[in-house]
Structures are given as structure tokens and as C-alpha cells.
Image (tube, rainbow, N blue to C red):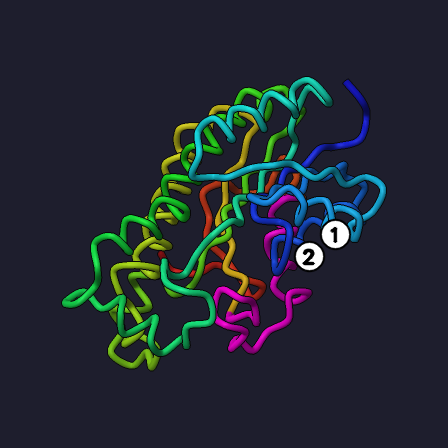
Amino acid sequence: MQDKPVALVTGANKGIGLQIAKDLAAHGFIVFVGSRNLEHGETAAKSVGADARALHLDVTNQPSIAAAAERIRKELGRLDVLVNNAAVSHAGKPGRPLEDVAKSGRATVASLDEVRAVFETNVFGVIAVTQAMLPLLREAPAGRIVNVSSGAGSLTRNADPTNPHRAMFGVTYSASKTTLNAITLAFALDLESTRIKVNAACPGFTATDLNNFQGTRTVQQAAGEPVRLALLDANDPTGTFSNEDGPLPW
């Protein structure tokens, strides 16, 4: 057991996840850079700094998750922060225009295979990783779980007829983030008697390969709220959904 706090960021070899890893390292964390491709993770870890360690982690593969948890246990003995960042927006070929992704996710035409594939990463992957890492989080003085969600999953916002983006709400990506919000609250309620806090962050419409770089925010801006939630103190809340401007409606 060592003194520096320990963090794991899933999907941290690029985009928002990589920036979150860099920011946590700057706050004094040893950061495990989770990546499906270990080589990509190793390259990313070098860019994070000396306190970063590449970790092979496929959130859709249970043996990979178990091996990652075991490695963290053997090397450092605890986990202070888990950031569930890994996500996909669709199951098609990379580079699909955002408009095409939105159309294919409409409830009346969506492919069940694609819905299942998106939920496998964005929903089931989060449950599996969180459950596997909980014993390590319990070993920390005050564990923090941050789920990187999206305002696109807000039922309240999408039920508002004045919301210009509600036409984008579908049964794949958006619904997966709605479900992720429910999972966040479920874990928060189940763990509210412990020192572990569970919250969801919306990074905003950020330019990453998730949206074919059509987003309008930088990864530096996007990482701000997840990192804030990772650093909450004992008096801060659990079971919340927020962005940099404050609470968001579920």
C-alpha cells in the first residue's frame, strides 16, 4: 500500500478519457490508463506522465475486467477513483456522419444488434467494471465513482418540446446514457452507507471520434466536470447528474 491516491479511467487512450487521466495525474494520482488496445494505452500513458500505467481493459470482456482488477490489487492494493468513461455512439464503421448515426438510432428503425452493441459498452460494461472494482474502492479512505454520461440522455430535457436537440433522442446512444444515469443512481443508493460516492457528469458536445469530431467543445473543457466529481470531499453529495454549470435534470 502506498500513499498516492490511485485512479482508473476506462477508455483513456484518447479523447476525454485521456484528458481526465492527465488532469488526475496533475492532481497527484497514480493513474491506470484503461485501453482495449494495450499498445495504444502505453502510448497514451507516456503522454500522461511518470505516474501513469497502461492497463489492458476491455469493458465488454469479463476476463479482461477481472485481470485488470487483480493487477490493481497486486500493484497498489486499492482504488480511490474509478472513472467509467469508455463509450461508443454506434456499432458501425468509424467516421459515420453524426446525422446518419442519429437517424439509424431512431426507435422505429434501429437495429437491435446495434442497440445491444452500444449497451454492451455504455451500460453493461459500466456495471461489470464497477462491480469488479468495488472491493478495491472499499479499501480506499473515500472512494469516488464518476460515470461520464450525457445531457442527450436526460428524459426531462428530451420531453421538452422546446428542446431543439430532442429529434436526436433515440434508442441506441441516447437511451444508453439514460440507462447509465439510472445505474449511477442505483449504485449511489446501494453505497450511500459507505464512504463511496457515485455521480454522473455531462462533458458537453465535445470534439472526439465519438461524434466524428463534430463536437464544439475541447477535451480540456470536457474533462473539468468529471475531474471535479472525482475530487469531491466527504461533505459533497452522491447520486447527482451535473455539468460545469451545475445540476442537470434526470
The amino acid type, in three-letter code, at marker 2 is: Gln
Which residue, given by chain and number where applicable, does mark 2 sit on?
A: 19
Q: Is residue 89 above or below residue 147?
A: below
Residue toward you, 248 or 100? 100
Circle 2: is it few (<14), some (14-19), or many (20+) Cα within 10 Å?
Answer: many
Q: Is residue 110 magenta?
A: no
Q: Residue furthest right?
A: 50
- In the rendered image, which residue does mark 1 sit on? 22
Q: CA distance from mark 2 to mark 1?
A: 5 Å
Q: Position of residue 142 (x, y in %)?
A: 63, 29
Q: Quadrant for residue 188, please give it.
A: top left
Kind of element beneath mark 1: helix
Q: Quadrant of residue 232?
A: top right
The part of the chain drawn in magenta is 205-230
Q: Is residue 212 visible?
A: yes
Q: Is residue 210 left or right of residue 90?
A: right
10 Å crowding of disc 1: few (<14), some (14-19), many (20+): many
Q: Quadrant of the C terminus?
A: bottom left
Look at the numbered disc 2 and give the secondary structure of its residue: helix
Residue extending farthest left = 108
**What residue is drawn where x is 53% and y is 49%?**
85
Quadrant in the picture for the N terminus? top right
Tell me, yes or no, if residue 153 can be seen here.
no
Question: Relative to 216, is 211 on the left or the right?
Answer: left
Marks 1 and 2: in contact by CB < 8 Å? yes
Q: Position of residue 2 (x, y in %)?
A: 80, 22
At label 1, the amino acid type is Lys
